[in-house]
């Protein structure tokens, strides 16, 4: 789609922030006006639209996409659904699966991943055991309950941001470490790609593809973390068909 507007603005209407493109209010794919509770998030989304040049690159507007997903809720997910999904992802967390084929790679994983696994255990007072087999690690019921208790303390929109971070990194541990500022976005992406970086250091890379994938992951994770932060202290409009509050 070609850019059809000259200016972007932010409007305050009934306690919510809206984005205008010239005289048109920005809407979600379902036709709902894009209403935002967080002023910084509204500015960030306006900046995404203002940064478009001749062609609107929707695939690069990650914050807009996150807002659309929350407001339209196309899959009818409740906060409980998302929390349970995140907790289930701990069983397949990237950092808990370590190599039994390459001693060199295993040493790197121990060096870079183990301190974060230990941080996670200390931070949430849980026990995790990594594995070197294809079998998923056993996550105790008490660990799951502790993580559920922590995640439900966030509102719906923030949980959605966390979920998107987990999907991007394939790691609950790295995502929560980034949210807690134990590591930054670049470090989280590098750690999530540790095995890939190890392999390319031995076999070489298709440079443009490698760098593009890395930068896209950093952009998606940055958006997810910002979306989480922006919504922690604000209550976003209740999603369509959602039975959750907050």
Image (tube, grey):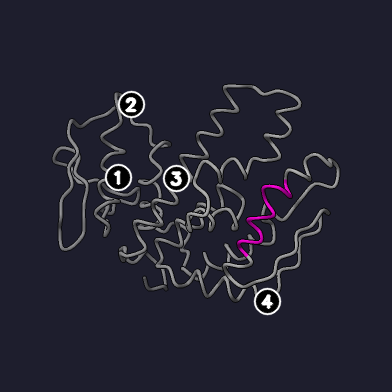
Instruction: Name the residue beneath numbered marker 2.
Output: 55
In three-dimensional space, the C-alpha distance between marks 1 and 3, rounded to whole angstroms, equals 12 Å
In three-dimensional space, the C-alpha distance between marks 1 and 2, rounded to whole angstroms, equals 19 Å
Evaluate if marks 1 and 2 touch, with contact meaning CB atoms under 8 Å apart.
no
* Rendered-image quadrant of the C terminus: bottom left
Helix, strand or loop at disc 3? helix
Is residue 209 positioned above or below 181 on the image?
above
Of the image marks 4 and 2, the number of the one nearer the N terminus: 2
In three-dimensional space, the C-alpha distance between marks 2 and 3, rounded to whole angstroms, equals 23 Å
Of the image marks 1 and 4, the number of the one nearer the N terminus: 1
Secondary structure that dominates the magenta span: helix
Helix, strand or loop at disc 1? helix
Evaluate if marks 4 and 2 touch, with contact meaning CB atoms under 8 Å apart.
no
Disc sitting over residue 162 in the figure:
none
Evaluate if marks 1 and 3 touch, with contact meaning CB atoms under 8 Å apart.
no
Estimate the x, y position of residue 170 in percent, counting from the top left.
61, 50
Instruction: Name the residue beneath numbered marker 1.
Output: 44
Of the image marks 4 and 3, the number of the one nearer the N terminus: 4
Q: Along the horizontal axis of the image, is 227 left or right of 116?
A: left
* Rendered-image quadrant of the N terminus: top left
Estimate the x, y position of residue 213 in percent, counting from the top left.
56, 33
The residue range painted magenta reads: 109-120
In three-dimensional space, the C-alpha distance between marks 4 and 2, rounded to whole angstroms, equals 50 Å
Neighbourhood count class around disc 4 (C-alpha, 10 Å): few under 14, some 14–19, many 20 upward: few
């Amino acid at each position: 789609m070609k850019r059809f507007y000259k200016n972007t603005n932010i409007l305050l209407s009934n306690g919510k922030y809206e984005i205008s493109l010239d005289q048109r209010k920005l809407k979600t794919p379902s036709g709902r006006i894009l209403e935002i509770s967080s002023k910084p998030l509204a500015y960030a989304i306006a900046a995404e639209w203002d940064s478009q040049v001749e062609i609107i690159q929707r695939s690069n507007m990650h914050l807009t996409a996150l807002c659309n997903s929350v407001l339209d809720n196309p899959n009818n997910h409740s906060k409980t659904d998302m929390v349970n999904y995140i907790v289930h992802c701990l069983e397949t967390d990237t950092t808990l699966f370590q190599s039994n084929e390459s001693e060199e790679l295993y040493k790197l994983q121990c060096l870079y991943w183990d301190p974060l696994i230990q941080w996670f255990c200390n931070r949430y007072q849980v026990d995790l055991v990594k594995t070197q087999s294809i079998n998923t690690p056993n996550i105790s019921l008490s660990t799951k309950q502790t993580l559920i208790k922590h995640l439900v303390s966030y509102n719906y929109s923030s949980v959605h941001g966390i979920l998107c971070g987990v999907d991007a990194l394939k790691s609950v541990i790295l995502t929560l470490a980034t949210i807690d500022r134990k590591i930054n976005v670049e470090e989280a992406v590098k750690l999530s790609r540790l095995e890939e970086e190890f392999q390319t250091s031995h076999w070489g890379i298709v440079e443009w593809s490698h760098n593009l994938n890395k930068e896209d992951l950093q952009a998606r994770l940055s958006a997810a973390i910002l979306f989480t932060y922006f919504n922690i202290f604000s209550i976003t409009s209740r999603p369509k068909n959602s039975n959750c509050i907050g």
